[in-house]
Image (cartoon, helix red, strand yellow):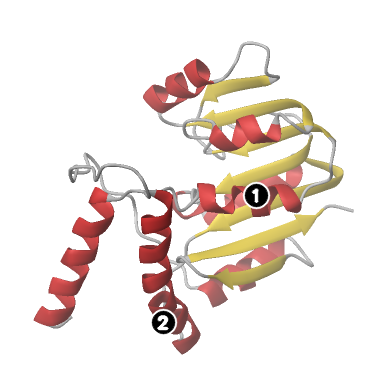
Amino acid sequence: MTPLSRRILHALDRFHAARPWDHNAHFHPWILRQLPTRVGSALDVGCGSGDLARLLAARAGRVHGIDADPAITARARESTPPSAPVTYTVADAPAGLPDHAYDAITCVAVLHHLPFTEALTAFRDRLAPGGTLVIVGVHRAQSPVDHLLALASVPLNIVMALLKNRGRRAARPVAMSARTRPADMTFSEIVREARAVLPGARLRRRLLWRYTLVWHRR
């Protein structure tokens, strides 16, 4: 990386630290569109503060969110109305996944932290017949298409940050207490391994450094 590239990246980091927005929440409406209008049960793996779990509760009879972080799971419980059909568990995936069948399973920006094939196998085995698995993940850029999409995501990211922070006072940059693990699998590797576990799975590269996977269990 050239000194100029490093300066540009540092400038972008400062810009977004002052104007934060949730890239993963941006995909929540898309996730809901992949699911039936009503489902009996849903599992959100890596639920974080519970934003997606609460959205799923509007169309599911019961929702179970799991996350490995006790503090953020406690925050999810505090932010969820007692009347909502949502429960949360502190657990590591895939070993700590509940041994139940679900009509919908979601997983957003978490899969690259897990053993890939083992996690997909666990999701498949817990999906009820007719159920839907929806994943939003991140991958390591390798191909020219990957790099073009990454380049196109930079101005989009800036525009989204400005729109979502419009009318707000600029926040002071906050240092991250922990670094997230970078993705080590390329998109082609993800497609190959995913389709070996989930035949017929639909995978697509997306803007904003993400890919999506949708699979329906017959």
Report the side of 53 relative to 215 (left or right). left
Front residue of this view, candidates 154 and 102: 154
Report the side of 112 relative to 6 (left or right). right
- In the figure, residue 102 lies in which quadrant? top right
Label 2 environment density (alpha carbons within 10 Å; few <14, some 14–19, many ≥20): some
Tag 1 residue: 29
- In the figure, residue 56 lies in which quadrant? top right
Front residue of this view, candidates 188 and 168: 168
Tag 2 residue: 147
Q: In this view, does 18 lie above or below 201?
A: above
Label 1 environment density (alpha carbons within 10 Å; few <14, some 14–19, many ≥20): few
- The residue tagged with tag 2: helix, strand or loop? helix
Q: Nearer the viewer, mark 1 or mark 2?
A: 1
Report the side of 40 relative to 47 (left or right). right
Residue depicted at 46% across the width and 67% down the height: 185
Q: Is residue 82 above or below residue 40?
A: above
**Which residue in the rendered view is the most extreme toward the front?**
167
Q: Could you tell me residue 195's position as x and y percent?
A: 70, 67
Q: Which quadrant does the N terminus fall into?
A: bottom left
The three-letter amino acid code for the residue at tag 1 is Pro
- The residue tagged with tag 1: helix, strand or loop? helix
- Disc 1 and disc 2: Cα gap in Å? 26 Å
Residue depicted at 24% across the width and 50% down the height: 17
Residue depicted at 49% across the width and 24% down the height: 76
**Which residue in the rendered view is the most extreme toward the bottom?**
144
Question: Between disc 1 and disc 2, whose residue precedes?
Answer: 1
